[in-house]
Image: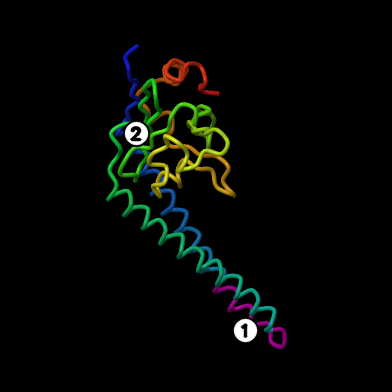
Amino acid sequence: MDESFVVGLNRAEVLRRRATVRRTRQIGGAVTLVLSGIGLGLAVALTLMLGDYWAIGLLMIASMLILVVSSVRGLQTGAKVKRWYDATDLPPYALRMTPATLELGVEGAPAPVVLPWPAVRGLRHRRLLGQPILELVLQPGVTPTSPGVQGLDQPAALATLTPGKWVKSAGFYGVASLDQPVAAIDQALRYFSRGTAAIG
């Protein structure tokens, strides 16, 4: 095996995934906005028909207004994601392994994330929304300031690779986006980490 192992990206698959995410957000946001608008109209009509019980109708109007505002914000978020996709090129690779480090290319991060092998527990192969993905699993206590760690403090890297309070998993690319099979990635992980990291 060479002194490095690079897992590239299937550009067509990543762009297809981006288009799917964008289209799903647009359709979902538009449908929710239309249904919320209809609900708001019905709530106003019901309020007018309730007479002395108009206060109940106001509660329904308020709840429908919350849905309308939420739908508009969802569409705005979709527009931001589209602008981000248009302005963000893909990193040169998804993974690069050497005897000393695991390097990760992260969408939106200008530099790769460099992790020494003692900081890496491995990768977890699982399904998210029906799609197989790989999640990075760091050793407990690893932070952007840990010895040998570089680039983890980039906002895009933190958002993608560091588990949050509510979202416990961290991942980067779907398996279909990678140009190497999972078995080959697992073999390279075991080789370069000297058996301390693997795909689980």
Which residue does the image show at 46% across and 26% down from the upper left? 117
Q: Which residues are magenta?
A: 40-53
| Residue 68 x, y percent position in the rendering | 51, 68
| Residue 150 x, y percent position in the rendering | 39, 39
Q: Main secondary structure of the magenta part?
A: helix
Drawn side of residue 91 relative to residue 72, left or right: left
Indicate whether residue 21 is drawn in magenta.
no
Up-down relation of residue 30 to residue 51 (above or below): above
Q: Residue furthest bottom?
A: 52
Q: Amino acid at mark 2?
A: Glu
Q: Tell me how far mark 1 sits from mark 2, CA to CA.
A: 53 Å
Q: Residue furthest front?
A: 147
Q: Which residue is mark 1?
A: 48
Bin the neighbour count of mark 2 within 10 Å (Cα to Cα): few under 14, some 14-19, many 20 and up.
some
Up-down relation of residue 50 to residue 100 (above or below): below
Q: Residue furthest right?
A: 53
Which residue does the image show at 49% across and 63% down from the upper left? 71
Indicate whether residue 45 is drawn in magenta.
yes
Q: Which residue is mark 2?
A: 13
Q: Amino acid at mark 1?
A: Leu
